[in-house]
Image (tube, grey):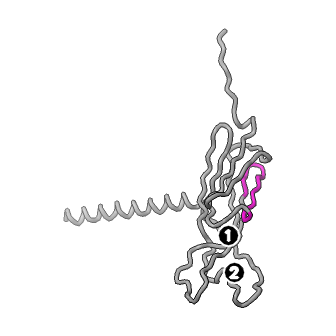
Amino acid sequence: MDKLAEFRHGLEETWHSLGEGWRQLRDRASEALTRFTPVNRSRSSPEDTSSPPALAANWGLLAGDLYEDGEQIVVRLEVPGMVKEDLELEVREDVLLIRGEKRVEQERGNGRYRVRQCTFGSFRRSFQLPAPVIAEKARAKCSNGVLRIELPKEARARGRRIEVRSG
């Protein structure tokens, strides 16, 4: 009976560990989970395969980081295969909006896809900004599939050191 109890205990611990792992993955990825809406463009010829096949994924992950220091807020977003012309940025009050379009990249030839996990189409991501920023002085750069946005904080959001004097 002791062996059965040990087995049950080990199974319960394994099940709990798996459940906790899935919860952590869900929590971490929930903001990165992004809906891609297919862009409807009329085809110029029957050979034009620029639009994604019906079985292409409509949801994908656009992982991002938000970093804050005393002077600025930095947002990094992974946007593989995209260039600056594919992206549009806007600050509305305390939210950074990122819109874009990931275009279809298909292999040409006689083969056919067996697995289709890449997402294509237009998307929208938003980041809640932890402090007021000066949107007019923001800078953005897209390089090697990473979009980096630097948003200088407003002076009132930076804080101010107060010297304590005696007497």
Marker disc for residue 31: none
- 154 with respect to 163 (left or right): right
- Where residue 162 appears, as percent x and y from the top left, is 68, 23
Q: Residue at x 66, y 65 (%)?
A: 82
Badge 2: residue crowd in 10 Å (few <14, some 14–19, many ≥20): some
Q: Is residue 132 above or below residue 1?
A: above
Q: Amino acid at mark 2?
A: Ser
Q: Dot 1: what SS?
A: strand
- Where residue 92 appears, as percent x and y from the top left, is 78, 52
The span shown in magenta is: 85-97
- 141 with respect to 116 (left or right): right
User: In the rendered structure, does residue 70 fall within the stretch colored magenta?
Assistant: no
- Where residue 74 appears, as percent x and y from the top left, is 65, 47
Q: Dot 2: what SS?
A: loop
Displayed quadrant of residue 45: bottom right
Q: Nearer the viewer, residue 22 or 64?
A: 64
Q: Badges 1 and 2: C-beta atoms under 8 Å apart?
A: no
Type of secondary structure dominating the magenta stretch: strand
Badge 1: residue crowd in 10 Å (few <14, some 14–19, many ≥20): many
Mark 1 or mark 2, which has the lower sequence index?
A: 2
Circle 2 sits on which residue?
A: 51
Q: Residue at x 34, y 63 (%)?
A: 12
Position of the C terminus, as image quadrant, is top right
Q: Residue furthest top?
A: 167
Circle 1 sits on which residue?
A: 102
Instruction: Report, in whole angstroms, how far the alpha carbon at label 1 lies from the one at label 2.
Output: 11 Å
Q: Is residue 49 above or below residue 129?
A: below
User: In the rendered structure, does residue 93 fall within the stretch colored magenta?
Assistant: yes
Q: Nearer the viewer, residue 161 or 89?
A: 89
